[in-house]
Image (cartoon, rainbow, N blue to C red):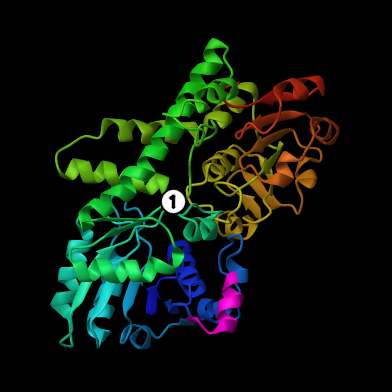
Amino acid sequence: MKIAVAGTGYVGLVAGVCFAEMDHDVTCVDVDEKKVEVMRQGISPIYEEGLEELMQKNNAKGTLHFTTDYKEAYKDADAIFIGVGTPEMPDGSANLSYIATVSRQIAETVEKDCLVVVKSTVPVGTNDKVEQFIKDFLVHDVKVEVASNPEFLAQGTAVYDTLHAARIIIGTESREAEALLKKIYEPFNLPIVSVKRRSAEMIKYACNDFLALKISYMNDIANLCELVGADITDVAKGMSYDERIGARFLNAGIGFGGSCFPKDTKALKHLAREYGYQLKTVEACVDVNSAQKVRLFEKAKERMISFSGLKAAVLGLTFKAGTDDLREAPSIDNLKLLLAAGADVYAYDPKGEERARQLFPEGKLEQGTMSYVSDPYKALEGANICFVFTEWGEIKAITPEQFKSRMHTPLVYDGRNLYDPKQMKEAGVEYYSIGR
């Protein structure tokens, strides 16, 4: 089947590549000519395990194409998937301007009946507006229907999540649209849950916000564990055996980041308020996460007289391991505070450095300085304090003895609970983690 994909971010690119892997004829559209040229060479603009290999494989196979010419891509496509960004607005609502731009391009371009499928995360009711918007601007006498097909990939495992999804959610308003989407996904051989469009839109938010709630709940319990002398890792282990709760998303830490949970919790909160309803659980989740991100810095501030002139090692910059994404990463909030307090920061991340440099260029920043190093041990050399923000394998591999021998003052604040407190203490490291 001939498929066009608008947008080559995490959603659009991964979807397009996986459709091509299933032998659909896929053309991915982006406005950035340089980015398109790089992708034509089989180079991924984002880091995702297995993505670049599949790009190269399907480029060579001839099932995957990249272009800036949306007119050529859309005009005779059987289905057009919209995977552009819906960034957060200052009030927490979703910015739908990119959706609108692509919708108008589709309306003015399509020359045959086609199905437009919105994969981007959008507020409930957006698909209705997209369909009407396209009809308002249609140039040719063709039939265009709109369907909802939210993605549920996790960054770092996006390719696997797409090819081995627990289920495919499709939201349609006609049997024809439902049948076409099922045909597109038939080669994946995955369970399909078919619902109405608005239900599909809500499923996406409901799932993401439930997981975000689970994380914030565990972080709240972890903070209480510290006060009462309990160990959150023991608590989580005991909870994990309860089938009603499950074992995933029970790890306490410094809060969630990334492109989904922070944005989606705020968007659902905003949507509820538009309808005159207060989602108290989701609002509490947002508040807990905001405070959790800087909890370790606040602990360190109580311990230190001043950060001015101190060497601060920062291990991990991305919001989690397996991705180069820094969106809403806890490291960003903490770096701003450290630099404003006059610290000389030496940061290490195996995949996120390039994106971090766009936010924090090397050199004098605020009252402190920013430097990047090629391995975590260089960051630790002579450091007065160390913060751990991402659970990369290279960071997990550091032993308590290496913290002790390399740091000027072995003082470690671990936001991912990577190390054993007893072993750190025995090695002579002053160690602080979450909920332990």
From the image, tell me which residue sits under label 1. Answer: 166
Q: Is residue 164 above or below residue 208?
A: below
**In the image, residue 237 lies at what x, y percent?**
57, 25
Single out the residue that lies furthest toward the top: 228
Does the stretch in magenta take in 374? no
Residue 47 in sight in this render = yes
- Considering only vertical position in the picture, is 249 above or below 190? above
Residue 197 as seen in the image, left or right of residue 356: left
Of the pair 267 and 245, the residue shown nearer to us: 245
Question: Where is residue 344 shown, x and y percent of the image?
Answer: 69, 43
In the displayed structure, would residue 163 be above or below residue 413? below
Q: Is residue 385 or residue 94 the one in the foreground?
A: 94
Residue at 39% x, 57% y is: 151
Q: Does residue 317 appear left or right of residue 191 in this picture?
A: right
Q: Residue at x 17, y 82 (%)?
A: 138
Q: Residue at x 40, y 45 (%)?
A: 262
Q: Is 62 a magenta residue? A: yes
Specify start and end residues of the magenta stretch as a single range: 54-65
> In terms of secondary structure, where does tag 1 sit?
loop
Q: Position of residue 313 (x, y in %)?
A: 70, 40
Q: Amino acid at mark 1?
A: Ala
